[in-house]
Amino acid sequence: MKCEKSEKIKTSEQPKFRNLYINFGCKRDPSKKEQHQLKDISKRWFVYYDFLLPTGLYSGFKIYGYINREHTVATRYDLAVQLRDQLQVLIEEYGFNPVTKALTPRKVSAVTDPGEQIRQLPICEAIEWAFEKHSPNLAHKTRADIKSVLKYVYAAIHAINYNSITVGEFKKSPPSVGDGAGAKSTGN
């Protein structure tokens, strides 16, 4: 279980698009990879995707481009793959909106200090980032143990409503006098 920011998914947290695929003119078989789908050259091919509208709902869009001008499966397939990849870049990096046909580039964070970027992350995302960063250096069993503990950590963070607090908002507190930090037992 990953830590969620809130119970209700906000539109800003939903992906801008989903279900980006090429339709080859035949019924799509989800169990097969794109290269092994049936391809009918006599029908119109298109790239399909669902785009997130400001209402919070997804709406489907078809893009034909110049795919159907080609008359061989191989060249038509190559054009369709190029169109799909270019469309993905347009949406992700340039903020293409198919409704308004406008481009709105992503806002680049003015913060260039990596430490400051980490301090701006919500606590759950920071924990996930740290785990992903260090997991290649861990043994398989250690990685599995940490992963099993993290689901309880995420649940606890969510239960006490700390899921929206950033790393920078946490204050380091000195150890209290009665917690035994640094104290040695006298044995009496």
Image: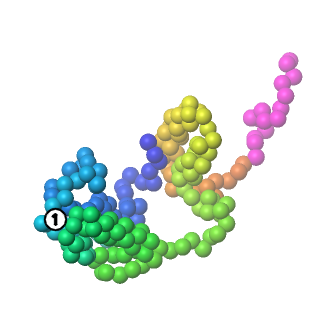
Q: Which residue appears at 31% of the width and 66% of the height? A: 78
- The quadrant of the rendering that contains the N terminus is top left
- Mark 1 sits on what residue? 41
Residue 155 in sight here = yes
Which image quadrant is residue 18 in? bottom left
Give percent across and percent down for residue 70.
22, 72
Residue 83 appears left or right of 145: left
On screen, residue 7 above or below 62:
above
On screen, residue 116 above or below 7:
below
Q: Which residue appears at 60% of the width and 74% of the height? A: 110
Residue 56 appears left or right of 6: left
Q: Nearer the viewer, residue 171 or 85?
A: 85
- The quadrant of the rendering that contains the C terminus is top right
Give percent across and percent down for residue 162.
53, 50
Disc 1 residue crowd, few under 14, some 14–19, many 20+, Cα 10 Å: some
Q: Which residue appears at 56% of the width and 34% of the height? A: 140
Which region of the structure is painted magenta? 174-188
Query: Magenta includes 160?
Result: no
Q: Nearer the viewer, residue 161 or 39?
A: 39
Residue 84 in sight here = no
**Please, which colouring scheme is shown?**
rainbow
Q: Nearer the viewer, residue 71 or 173?
A: 71
Q: Nearer the viewer, residue 169 or 2?
A: 2
Q: Amino acid at mark 1?
A: Ile
On screen, residue 36 above or below 188:
below
Give percent across and percent down for residue 48.
25, 65
**Residue positioned most to the top:** 188
Give percent across and percent down for residue 46.
22, 68
Q: Which residue appears at 33% of the width and 75% of the height? A: 97
Q: Magenta residues: mostly which secondary structure?
A: loop
Q: How many discs mark residues in the rendered view?
A: 1
> What is the secondary structure assignment of the residue under circle 1?
loop
